[in-house]
Image: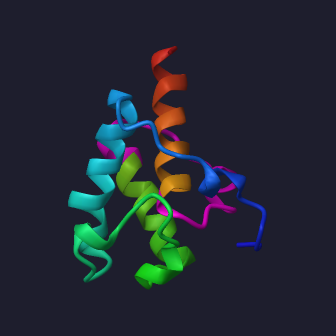
């Protein structure tokens, strides 16, 4: 994962967007607890994945979890530059919206 490549991590998540909210809740409440011991209260969209102790293999597995949860096809290039919780949530949310034609 290259530094500075992911501008998505600087974006603010629109929590009023039901898709974004659903994806954020999935990761923070269901997926992350399987990979890290951090409480959901300390996790925010700006939190870097490496701050949670997550590495590239964990990111791959998180994407696989999202594929199963939301019936998606996520390619390596879709997540290879993601470094933050917000970046991951936005990528998956956008995949869902693309799939649903929104």
Looking at the picture, tell me which residue is in the foreground, 98 or 25: 25
39 up-or-down from 75: above or below: below
Q: Position of residue 75 (x, y in %)?
A: 62, 49
Magenta range is 67-85
The residue positioned 55% from the left and 24% from the top of the image is 98
The residue positioned 27% from the left and 79% from the top of the image is 38
Looking at the picture, tell me which residue is in the foreground, 6 or 54: 6
Q: Position of residue 5 (x, y in %)?
A: 78, 62
* Left or right: where 3 falls relative to 70: right
The residue positioned 39% from the left and 62% from the top of the image is 44
* Left or right: where 44 falls relative to 92: left
Q: Position of residue 2 (x, y in %)?
A: 77, 72
Scheme of colours in the image: rainbow
The residue positioned 47% from the left and 43% from the top of the image is 13
Looking at the picture, tell me which residue is in the foreground, 3 or 100: 3
Q: Position of residue 36 (x, y in %)?
A: 31, 80
**77 is within the stretch colored magenta:** yes
**4 is within the stretch colored magenta:** no
Looking at the rendered image, the quarter that the N terminus falls into is: bottom right
* Left or right: where 4 falls relative to 88: right
How many marks the image carries: the answer is: 0
């Amino acid at each position: 994962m290259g530094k500075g490549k992911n501008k998505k991590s600087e974006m603010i998540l629109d929590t009023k967007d039901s898709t974004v909210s659903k994806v954020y809740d999935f990761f923070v409440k269901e997926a992350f607890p399987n990979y890290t011991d951090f409480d959901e209260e300390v996790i925010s969209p700006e939190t870097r994945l490496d701050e949670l102790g997550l590495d590239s293999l964990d990111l791959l597995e998180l994407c696989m979890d999202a594929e199963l949860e939301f019936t998606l096809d996520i390619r390596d290039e879709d997540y290879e530059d993601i470094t933050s919780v917000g970046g991951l949530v936005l990528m998956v949310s956008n995949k869902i919206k693309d799939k649903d034609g929104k």
